[in-house]
Structure formats: C-alpha cells, structure tokens
Amino acid sequence: MNTLQFKEAIAETIRAYNAKGWSPATSTNYSFKDEHDTIWVSRSGVDKANFQASDFITVDSNGTATGEFEGIQPSAETLIHCVLYELFPATKVILHSHGIYPVLLSTVCEHEVSFEGYEIQKGFAGQSTHEARVTLPIFDNDQDMARFKEVLIQHKSSLMNAAFIMRKHGVYAWGTSLFEAKRHLETVDYLCQCEWFVLNRPTPTQY
Ligand SMILES: [Zn+2]
C-alpha cells in the first residue's frame, strides 16, 4: 500500500467511525507511519464526517508539523501518537475514539478495566481463548501532553494489549497494520459496551 492508498484507507475508516458516533464535534485524531517511518497525523478541526486523505500532515517526533505542512496545527493530542510510536516501534497505525461506552466505564472503574470470558477478547493480538483475563489501563485525562507522555512511558508494561482508556475522554488503540488497529479499537468498544450493560442490568426486583 503506498502512502496515498494508506491515507485513503484510513480516511474511509475515520468517516465510518464518525457514522458510529465515535468522533462528535470534530474531535478525535488518527495517525499512521509511512514506509520511510514518517508520522502522518490528522490535522485539527476537521469534521470527521468529511475527512479526506489530504487532511493528514507530517510531524516530527515532538509532534510539530514539518515540511510543506509547517505552521499547520496538528491535533492537540499528537504527542500521544509520537510517544506510542516511540514505545512500540512496530506500530503502523494509531486510532482514537470518543465512543461513549469506554467513557462511561471510566466513570466507575478506577485504574483499569478487566474483561473475562468474552469470545471477542481474541480480537486482541496474542489472545487465543476467551478463558483469560484481559486488562486495559485507565489514565486520568490531561490537557498537558508533555505530562501525559510521561504517564505513558511509566506505564508501558500495562499497554501490552495495544490500547488504553483516558478517563471521561476516549480510547487509543494501535496496531502493526490498519486492519489490526481497527480490530483492537472495535474490540475495546464492544467489550466496554458489554461491561457497561452488565454493570447496569436491572436487578430481579425491577422486573
Ligand atoms: Zn480525544
């Protein structure tokens, strides 16, 4: 897949996720690494319903726009993408969602959320059975990206399922391909949805 094809494929994913309600009010951000290991990230303020391949810009490892894109504002959370590529060099694509179920769960779970017994846990790379416990960390939301970068570095060992939740904010998920990153993000969303409904199921007296 060349860079343009890559951009077009991710732009299509972004529009599809917008249709699911995962990126309201121009929110969320996405990135990929091309064959030269250059990071391309979605620029800020674009309505994700209309996101196009031309809405990706290149940034350096500090999240500053480079080359022909110098001066253009990348997403405010670009530094999160940069540090994830640094921590997990095999990563090719990073996706972010503001879907509501992980957000809702993060209001009742403290530092992590665990899933056990669900078939779809196998959506995480390396998980081959539902008979396991998969845990994702929940980090407090932070507008200070330099500080949040340090949190990710400190908690690298908890990021082995290629996803984390930011409290009352959303999910980051990544993969070694677009296919894998999508599978991870969709797995997280589905499992959070299940857990939210399990936590909030009516008690027998409510019938
Ligand atoms: Zn966000």
Image: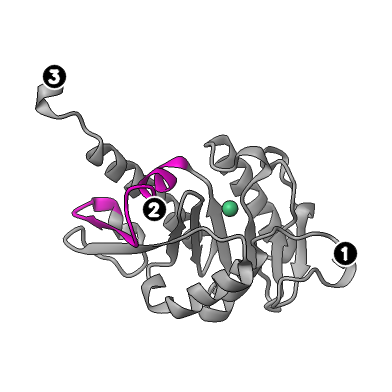
In the picture, measured across the screen, residue 44 lies left or right of residue 187, that is right
Q: Which residue is mark 3?
A: 207
Give the residue number, with chain letter if any, for mark 1.
71
Q: Which stretch did the figure color magenta? A: 100-120
Query: In which quadrant will I find the N terminus?
Result: bottom right
In the image, what residue type sits under mark 2? Val
Label 1's element? loop
Residue 202 lies in quadrant: top left
Which residue corresponds to the image point at 66% horizontal and 38% vertical from the top-left? Answer: 25
Cβ–Cβ below 8 Å for labels 2 and 3?
no
- Residue type, mark 3 in image: Tyr
Tell me residue 163's x, y (percent).
44, 63
Q: Residues within 10 Å of mark 2 (few under 14, many from 20)?
A: many
Quarter of the picture holding the C terminus: top left
Distance between mark 1 and mark 3 Cα atoms: 59 Å
What residue is drawn where x is 52% and y is 37%? 20
In reply to whether residue 24 is colored magenta, the answer given is no
Residue 89 visible = no
- Amino acid beneath label 1: Gly
Above or below residue 24? Residue 173 is below
- Which percent across, then down, holds residue 112? 33, 61
Can you tell me whether the CB of the residue at mark 2 lies under 8 Å from the nearest atom of ligand 1? Answer: no
Q: Mark 2 highlights which residue?
A: 188
Residue at the image position 15 percent from the left and 21 percent from the top? 206
